Image (cartoon, rainbow, N blue to C red):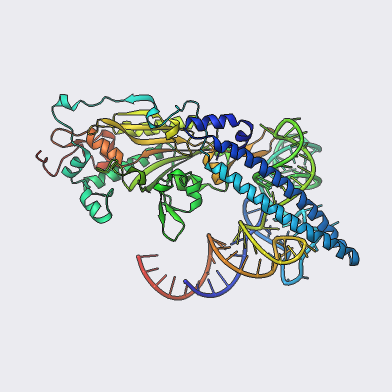
Amino acid sequence: MIDPRVLRDDPARVRASLAKRGLSDEVVDRSLAADSARRAAIAEFEAKRAEQKSMGKLVAQAKGEEKTELLARTKALAAEVKAAEAAQKEAEDTWNECLSSMPNLTAEQTPPGGEEDFALLETVGEIRDFAAEGFAPRDHVELGRMHAAIDLERGAKVSGSRFYFFTGIGARLHRALIAMALDMAHENGFTEVVPPSLVKPRAMEGTGFLGQAADDVYTIEGQDMYLVGTSEVPMAAYHSDEILDAEQLPFRYAAVSPCFRKEAGSHGKDTRGIFRVHWFDKVEMFVYTTLEEAPAEHERLLAWERQFLDALELSYRVIDVAAGDLGLSAFRKFDCEAWIPSQERYREVTSTSNCTDFQTRRLDTRGRFAKEDGGTATGPIATLNGTLCSVNRPIIALLEQHQQADGSVRVPKALQPYLGGLEVLVPVHPAEQA
RNA sequence: GGAGGCGUCGCCUAGUCAGGUCUAUGGCGCCCGCCUGCUAAGCGGGUUUGGGGCUACAACCCCAUCGAGGGUUCAAAUCCCUCCGCCUCCGCCA
């Protein structure tokens, strides 16, 4: 959630941010009203409670008639305290509902508007001209079949649509990419983590995935648990209810986990192949740092994502995602989109978000900061996340971008050590006749 | 799955059976100060977190906080109920 003080002191900023996302600012008025109602209720309860406490002491000392008289008065007071407490709780609940329904603020640089309104930051690498090379590029489904790397038919047979088996070189590629990503993360100072991919509601709510995105979340029947759509969820909740020593920040984690998504709103979209699926594995970077350092850390996360894509010798572009497409938690988001030859367009392969203090406030993660007078004070800290390797999509980009006329695929140099020195993937099945 | 034990302000710990100056004890650690060639020791003070009031978002005052949530009571760390977590033993399965 956003800083309540910002809402109170500068509601115009919150309204502007909501407008940028294309949302109504009606929640601001509701929140402000809830806030003053809440504070009034708190004052009411505290006054009554203080009175009750002081009278309780008198009762303890009083005797005989004096005591019975006091008891009659405190009994009435007790009812008032109880009522005031209930009123306070209700006011707090309303206030919390308002606050938790509100998305994060947005960065100045974040463009207003929806999915199409992104700002293009940079284009990396040339778009390969297959026509000039004299052949039409195959898509990853066909290449996957030729290499016996991706088995979509059996995936559908066993688990349904949007499922698949990686087999043979496909499975090796999967392992190689994860290993390469983790090695890079390790070299860049990240702590490797294998988190649980089943979490309690708190973690899901805290990361903002039970809002509008709830349709996309798999639930466990009768268990009050969720399958995570990204390891951002367990990693954000990892330090919940903790106060971290600000001196030691940043905490950088690289988590590998399966990701599960219902893709409820995307019927008919990207139905071919392994681009949009119900389950995939992913190496995710997750960072806890100070609010001041967060923007610079965000740039670093982007740089590490690019380092990975560059190592795979991929062509891609970097965009500054527009406000309407940020999701609940993000303050600013950069996507890297790889060129997909068969689709003749750029598609998202990685995404990095600066969530500022939005998630840490929801999950009660704070920092302990040194004060000038030698003491310490607690304060908000920031979380950021970034995809290092979403596996499926890099595999698609790699197969398609590095394919050759005969269906073989060039292995980028950095990946070769992870595939036993293999320089070229040679198809095991001949090209299908058109 | 069954039986038992435990959960106190960083760590350890007193208090829970007999509800009321508990405004939660003491130790360790840490911070500030004093003392002191330096350090250590010693001495004095401070040290949960969240919220509200007032304000310079200081100081100060107040409320909540003894795993969480309910209940009993004028009054709950203390009594009752539910839940969560940890430990031990048994069973089951790797």
| Residue at 33% over, 40% down | A180
Q: Quadrant of residue B33?
A: top right
Place of residue A113 in the rendered image (x, y in percent of width and height, measured from the top left): 43, 29
Closest to the observer, A312 or A109: A109
Q: Quadrant of residue B4?
A: bottom right
Q: Is residue A175 left or right of residue A371?
A: left
Q: Is residue A238 left or right of residue A283?
A: right
Residue found at the very far right of the displayed protein:
A65
**Quarter of the figure with the C terminus of chain A:** top left
| Residue at 36% over, 36% down | A350
**Quarter of the figure with the N terminus of chain A:** top right
Closest to the observer, B55 or B18: B55
Q: Is residue A261 left or right of residue A174?
A: right
Is residue A276 in view from this perspective? yes
Closest to the observer, A210 or A315: A210
Place of residue A171 in the rendered image (x, y in percent of width and height, measured from the top left): 25, 47
Place of residue A327 in the rendered image (x, y in percent of width and height, measured from the top left): 45, 38
Q: Is residue A311 left or right of residue B34?
A: left
Is residue A41 depicted above or below A296 in this figure?
Answer: below
Q: Quadrant of residue A116?
A: top left
